[in-house]
Image (cartoon, rainbow, N blue to C red):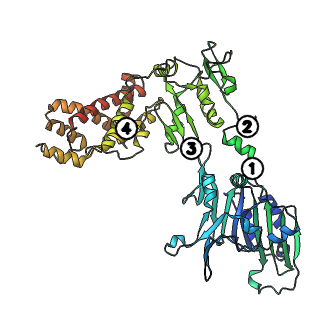
């Protein structure tokens, strides 16, 4: 079924008004075709409780569909409100499975998928559903209330609905991604059994069944039912559908070890790259089979052949910080992929190596490809030291240094600064592009991380304890200055130390405030004129803040 448009399924519950359409409807000639086509969909119905429609599903051990097994399964008496229970006789008590009284010997050996439960102590749980815990564990799916689904992350790090509950005013549908259920069925050696009951009649003139008509056995390759028809009045059918939806175990094993299921499945992009082994810049595939390591004698490029990109390639990862983790030289996508390293050269280009690009999903490789360009300058000094000379890169980098100090303050639980948001440090990055919006956004992020962390109330009390008399209008940055004076810093020196904090806070107000206009444009032009790029300007103010924070930490080390 289409989980985003279940109209076709819901139409089964619609009673026709026209008499000719009603007479055709009660013949139930549409049931088998519907079930046969629906089981081929990406998502399949596990449970349906609608007017005129009941479908319920369980997993059963592999069964040969002969006359005996078919007759046994057609005796089913089961619904999701059958639960694990304890049963007591006069002299013993035991646990009974939810399928033990399902009316069928074969069905009693199966595994229930959906459980309908209720809890009188919570009105919101008057009726709710659970999925067999073994299934949720194996498939690593989790219920998300806002999506009304059991979900997992797909290979792109996006949330994917695996089991979905769809409710409307007439009833409920529960559907499941067939591939996911097929994965579990393969591991458990089971097949899917769907039990159905379609009861059709005219609601306004229905008075029950008289029991005179004989049931007709209807069957196809995998669907069997007994149908009773009262022409012009109504009909009812009860049946089963057995579907082998198992994924071949060989395919599962290959997926488990990260191998493509078919030779053509795994795709690789090509990039303009610097083949330093052969001293040429050309288009090269990132397919590992087209690359060589240091120990293989060949003419093909090395695995660590660098490709270069415009800095806008990173903007995608800044725009969704919940999904992506952008570090100073690596990127990860939640539960999906990881780019081991990247760096920025003197020309502002992002560069990484072909072998690491090959480990990304093909769609992600294409994202990088659209920003690919020829190298404008060599690799960064850090990349050369780290990746080619095997040395630790120890050159000072102000933003990581500043973050490190703030992390340490948080661990020490100092009273004068607090980390307001656990994710705030991960939101602050250098502005890699020439976008003034990115630059302004990073200044905002830095101000929120650093300046908003200062505890104004605590600082005000500390200033008073140091014998100073702060004015009521003083805010946190001015109070830090007063504290420094209170511990014997010269007033001019104290003002100079806090000036870097004031600078970042003022920039935030002028660049991101509602009145941003000509003044913001003048600041932008001056920053580019003085530093050459937003990156260099941001690096400079991070350095100033880092230096000031180090002095403040030392001055406040004895504060409680």
Helix, strand, or loop for circle 4? helix
Picture residue at 19% right of the left edge, 46% below the top: 460
Residue under label 2:
265
* Separation (CA) of disc 2 from disc 4: 43 Å
What is the x, y in percent for residue 275?
62, 17
- Of tags 2 and 4, the one toward the viewer is 2
- Of tags 4 and 3, the one toward the viewer is 3
* Separation (CA) of disc 3 from disc 2: 21 Å
Query: How many numbered discs, if any?
Result: 4
Helix, strand, or loop for circle 1? loop
Asked if residue 296 is positioned above or below residue 330 in the image, the reply reads above
What is the x, y in percent for residue 365?
63, 33
Residue under label 4:
446
Residue under label 3:
335
Is residue 342 rendered to the left or right of residue 74?
left
Residue under label 1:
247
Picture residue at 72% right of the left edge, 53% below the top: 182
* Separation (CA) of disc 4 from disc 3: 27 Å
N-terminal-most mark, 1 or 4: 1
| Res. 46 visible in picture | yes
Asked if residue 287 is positioned above or below residue 70 in the image, the reply reads above
């Amino acid at each position: 079924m289409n989980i985003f448009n279940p109209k076709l399924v819901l139409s089964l519950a619609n009673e026709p008004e026209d008499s000719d359409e009603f007479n055709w409807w009660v013949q139930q000639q549409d049931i088998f075709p519907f079930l046969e086509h629906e089981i081929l969909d990406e998502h399949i119905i596990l449970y349906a409780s609608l007017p005129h429609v009941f479908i319920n599903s369980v997993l059963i051990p592999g069964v040969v569909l002969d006359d005996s097994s078919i007759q046994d399964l057609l005796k089913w008496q089961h619904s999701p409100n059958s639960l694990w229970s304890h049963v007591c006789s006069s002299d013993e008590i035991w646990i009974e499975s939810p399928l033990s009284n399902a009316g069928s010997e074969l069905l009693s050996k199966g595994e229930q998928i959906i459980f309908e439960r209720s809890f009188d102590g919570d009105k919101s749980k008057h009726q709710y559903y659970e999925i067999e815990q073994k299934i949720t564990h194996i498939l690593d799916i989790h219920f998300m209330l806002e999506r009304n689904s059991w979900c997992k992350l797909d290979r792109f790090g996006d949330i994917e609905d695996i089991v979905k509950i769809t409710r409307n005013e007439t009833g409920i549908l529960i559907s499941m991604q067939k591939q996911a259920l097929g994965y579990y069925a393969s591991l458990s050696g089971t097949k899917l059994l769907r039990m159905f009951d379609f009861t059709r009649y005219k609601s306004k003139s229905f008075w029950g069944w008289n029991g005179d008509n004989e049931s007709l056995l209807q069957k196809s390759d995998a669907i069997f039912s007994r149908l009773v028809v009262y022409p012009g009045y109504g009909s009812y059918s009860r049946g089963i559908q057995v579907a082998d939806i198992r994924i071949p175990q060989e395919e599962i094993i290959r997926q488990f070890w990260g191998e493509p299921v078919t030779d053509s499945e795994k795709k690789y992009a090509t990039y303009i790259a610097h083949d330093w082994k052969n001293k040429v810049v050309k288009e090269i595939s990132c397919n590992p089979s087209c690359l060589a390591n240091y120990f293989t004698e060949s003419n093909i490029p090395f695995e660590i052949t660098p490709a270069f990109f415009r800095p806008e390639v990173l903007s995608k990862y800044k725009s969704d910080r919940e999904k992506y983790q952008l570090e100073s030289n690596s990127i990860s996508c939640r539960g999906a992929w990881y780019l081991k390293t990247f760096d920025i050269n003197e020309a502002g280009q992002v560069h990484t190596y072909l072998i690491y690009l090959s480990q990304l999903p093909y769609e992600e490789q294409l994202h990088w490809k659209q920003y690919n360009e020829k190298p404008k300058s060599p690799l960064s000094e850090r990349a050369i030291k780290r990746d080619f000379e095997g040395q630790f890169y120890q050159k000072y980098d102000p933003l990581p240094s500043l973050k490190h100090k703030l992390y340490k303050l948080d661990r020490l639980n100092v009273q004068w600064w607090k980390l307001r948001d656990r994710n705030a440090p991960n939101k602050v990055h250098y502005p890699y592009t020439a976008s003034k919006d990115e630059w302004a956004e990073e200044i905002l992020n830095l101000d929120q991380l650093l300046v908003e962390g200062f505890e104004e109330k605590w600082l005000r009390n500390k200033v008073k304890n140091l014998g100073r008399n702060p004015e009521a209008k003083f805010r946190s940055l001015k109070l830090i200055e007063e504290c420094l004076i209170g511990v014997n810093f010269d007033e001019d020196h104290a003002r100079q130390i806090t000036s870097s904090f004031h600078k970042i806070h003022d920039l935030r107000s002028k660049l991101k405030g509602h009145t941003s206009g000509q003044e913001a444009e003048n600041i932008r032009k001056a920053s580019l004129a003085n530093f050459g790029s937003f990156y260099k300007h941001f690096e400079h103010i991070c350095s100033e803040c880092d230096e000031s924070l180090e002095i403040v930490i030392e001055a406040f080390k004895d504060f409680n």
